[in-house]
Amino acid sequence: MNVAAKTKPQYDPEFTANVINATGPNSNPRVAQVVGSLIQHLHDFARDVDLTVDEWMMGVNKINRAGQMSNKQRNEGQLLCDVIGLESLVDEITNKQLIGADYEATKTAILGPFFRHDTPSTTKNTSIIKTMPKDGEVTYMHGIVRDAATSAPIKGITIDIWQCSTNGLYEQQDPDQAEFNLRGKFTTDENGYYGLYCLRPVPYPVPDDGPAGELLQLLDRHPYRPAHIHIIAGSDMYTPLTTQIFDRTSKYRDNDSVFAVKDDLVVDFEPIQGNPKATLELVYDIRLAKKDK
Ligand code: BEZ
Ligand code: FE
């Protein structure tokens, strides 16, 4: 049978401009720019892949289900963005704008959905382990927070730290963990020092029982993140830093399901000597950029 090669259909060349030009003169200029560009790219994408009504409806259903299953504990829309790398990309774009290129501040990484704003403050060298898992390895994590431009230690920086337990669950996902387990908020002392006891982190899967998990399956991808600890550091004077640090030896370091790993954020857990409270030590200094006045 002689099958003629299918030619690409031609679509109305005026259509997208008509849609974008429907924006009224009283629209906020940034909204008009962002939404106009989004319409342009979405229309180009639909024409590029010759998107059918059935395929578009599958996408709409996924977005609807993501919204329906989101609540205070679960942000499925954010997770969908994470698995396609969008939160990591937007994080990079935002921080390139905030921080000048003339000195090296600590690199940023995405916030993720498990941060809690209400973590209580605690004093230096406290343990954040409230529910000790059988297989937990206690780590003395400490470092100095410095000004990225002058390298001077900075006093009074607030450092929020959080991590999941060795079962791969954050405390708000797991009724068997005490509230605020593996979370702590610290303040640097006059030498810029912060210190605490935490667990050596483990890899864990992002929640994969919703549309984000289905998408991972459709793309033949796994849901795992490499072992990491989350950090937010900042003060009135310094640009807040949101980041994560990654265990060099962790599985999935080279294929994080949410694309957050950066070489500068890879750290080493070392055996500790002479400290009966921990078996491991993690030294991690942080460099913060001063806010523009
Ligand atoms: C996390 O690191 O906690 C995380 C980040 C993105 C998606 C899910 C979890
Ligand atoms: Fe995490």
Image (cartoon, rainbow, N blue to C red):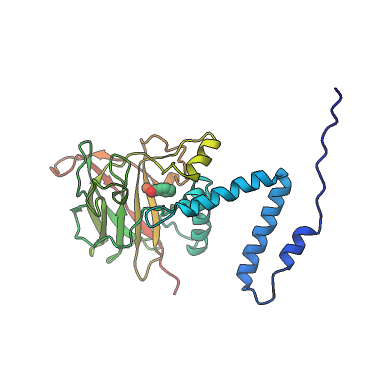
Q: Does 117 sit above or below residue 225?
A: below
Q: Which residue is more in the foreground, 146 or 228?
A: 228
Q: Quadrant of residue 274?
A: top left
Number of numbered labels in the structure image: 0
Name the residue furthest bottom.
Answer: 26
Q: Position of residue 97 (x, y in %)?
A: 52, 63
Residue 245 or residue 263, whichever sits in front: 245
Determine the residue positioned at 49% across, 51% down: 66
Q: Is residue 194 above or below residue 279?
A: below
Quadrant, the C terminus: bottom left
State the residue lying farthest toward the top: 1
List x then y, in percent, for residue 209: 44, 42
What residue lies at 28% left-to-right and 43% top-to-bottom? 165
In the foreground, 275 or 149: 275
Query: Residue 197, percent across and down?
Result: 21, 49
Q: Quadrant of the N terminus?
A: top right
